[in-house]
Amino acid sequence: MKIRENYTCPLEIVHDFVKGKWKTILIFQLRHGTKTFSELKNGIQGISEKMLIQQLKELQEFGIINKTSNEVYPLHVEYSLTARGTKLLEAVLIMQDIGVTYMIEHGQVELLEQKGIVCPNSIPTKK
């Protein structure tokens, strides 16, 4: 995917960086540091290997993530956020917070708890 050459505002560029189902989730997955391909694949339910490869490649092309390969056997590849990716993570965390608030408001606290997301000030669920 390429960034448009003609755009009306800088937000269109950022939209090109993150558009698609998985990119913001990948950025969120890398919030605590480096991860291997398999850690990312196992951490994102529903993503295919082909799609993960494509999304990681695009994020790398846009300067959002770094890919580090270790040339020893077995090959070991790690992904991490760049400075741009870390800055973009701030926006992703705000979006995550908005999503959590929405889910709490709509009675989905139990689903959040199943995902391991702590919900401060939420209405307790029935067990």
Image (spheres, rainbow, N blue to C red):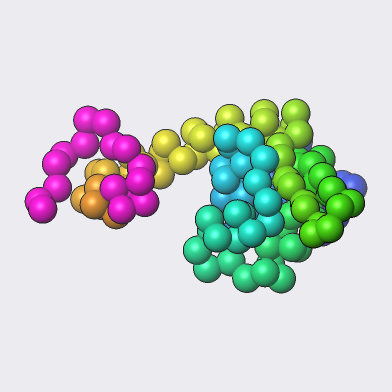
Q: Would you say residue 6 sits in the magenta stretch?
A: no
Q: Residue at x 46, y 40 (%)?
A: 96
Residue 30 shows in this picture: yes
Disc tally is 0
Residue 124 image offset from top left, x and y in percent:
14, 41
Residue 97 image offset from top left, x and y in percent:
42, 36
Position of the N terminus by quadrant: bottom right
Q: Quadrant of residue 34?
A: top right
Residue positioned most to the left: 126
Residue positioned most to the front: 73
Q: Would you say residue 126 sits in the magenta stretch?
A: yes
Q: Main secondary structure of the magenta part?
A: loop
Residue 19 image offset from top left, x and y in percent:
66, 53
Q: Residue at x 25, y 44 (%)?
A: 105
Residue 10 image offset from top left, x and y in percent:
76, 35
Q: Quadrant of residue 98?
A: top left
Q: Nearer the viewer, residue 22 or 69?
A: 69
Q: Residue at x 76, y 34 (%)?
A: 82
